[in-house]
């Protein structure tokens, strides 16, 4: 079974750093891009960026470029999303998802991790 | 950026009803559209890919159609387990992906 398992909920103060993780199981982790998606409380889904663990090629949404860093460790099949200085506005659920591209111009997110809730509050 | 607009934002329907959700793209995206279902407190799940193809395991009461700028998700006979928020997502402008704002479906 292909699945992504994310790290647990975090409660942080503004200004702190944080790294959350997403571990892949049941498939060749190095051969599929991993997306990160933000969902603020009661809101919709926002694509943040993606990484190809095979060579760490990374793409960011302009909205998140410079705000977060996406990385991956292919030896452990784990992708990471990190912040150097959290803000209250980073409070959200964060999902990872595998990018599936079975053919040119066919592209979807499947499966998704269970989500990591990040709360930033003083 | 390609903007995706869903309507309605919320919808209340009875069990057995036919439910229609629409998604409009700000420019032509051909058939490069997926639909996801997010049940309360859960992660999203792929429902339909390439505008009209049902993901394995998705009940046949779900269907998708459309191309260009206008897309539709239909539930032919609403079931209690279909209570969720539904999101469309375009992939015409990879590596930039955008989602619709979501349609929250409730039982009347």
Image (cartoon, coloured by chain):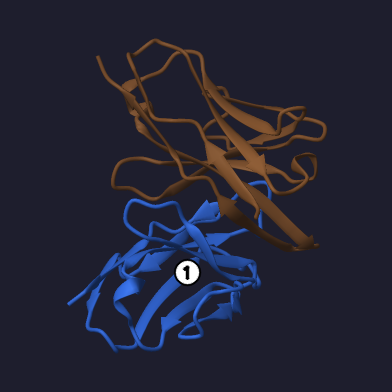
Chain colours: A brown, B blue
Choose top left, top right, bottom left or bottom right for residue A13: top left
Is any atom of residue B1 visible in this view? no
Q: Quadrant of residue B91?
A: bottom right
- Could you say where residue A106 lies in the image, as x and y percent from the top left? 72, 64
Tell which subunit mark 1 falls on. Answer: B
Q: Residue at x 37, y 81 (%)?
A: B20
Question: Which residue is labeled 1 in the image?
Answer: B24
- Above or below A96: residue A44: below
Against A24, residue B28 (above or below) is below
The image quadrant where one finds the C terminus of chain A is: top left
Q: Quadrant of the N terminus of chain A?
A: bottom right
Residue A54, above or below B95:
above
Across and down, in percent, residue A9 comes to 39, 30
Q: Position of residue A2 (x, y in %)?
A: 65, 52
- Front in this rendered view, residue A106 or A79: A79
Taking depth in this image into account, of A32 and A23 the one nearest to the observer is A23
Instruction: Count the labels in the image.
Output: 1
Picture residue at 61% right of the left edge, 73% below the top: B56
Neighbourhood count class around disc 1 (C-alpha, 10 Å): few under 14, some 14–19, many 20 upward: many
């Amino acid at each position: 079974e292909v699945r992504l398992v994310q790290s647990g909920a975090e409660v942080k103060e503004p200004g702190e750093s944080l790294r959350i993780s997403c571990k892949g199981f049941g498939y060749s982790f190095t051969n599929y891009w991993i997306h990160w998606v933000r969902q603020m409380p009661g809101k919709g889904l926002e694509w943040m960026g993606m990484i190809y663990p095979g060579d760490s090629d990374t793409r960011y949404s302009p909205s998140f470029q410079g705000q977060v860093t996406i990385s991956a460790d292919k030896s452990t099949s784990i992708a990471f999303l990190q912040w150097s200085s959290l803000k209250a506005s980073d409070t959200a659920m964060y999902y990872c998802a595998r990018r599936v591209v079975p053919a040119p111009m066919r592209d979807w997110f499947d499966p998704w991790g269970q989500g990591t809730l990040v709360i930033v509050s003083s | 950026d390609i903007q995706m607009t869903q309507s309605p934002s919320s919808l209340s329907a009875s069990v057995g009803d036919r439910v229609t959700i629409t998604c409009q793209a700000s420019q032509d995206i051909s058939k490069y559209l997926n639909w996801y279902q997010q049940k309360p407190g859960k992660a999203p799940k792929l429902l339909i890919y390439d505008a009209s193809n049902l993901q394995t395991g998705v009940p046949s009461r779900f269907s998708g159609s459309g191309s260009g700028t206008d897309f539709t998700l239909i539930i032919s006979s609403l079931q209690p387990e279909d209570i969720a928020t539904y999101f469309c997502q375009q992939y015409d402008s990879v590596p930039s992906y955008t989602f619709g704002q979501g349609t929250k479906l409730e039982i009347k």
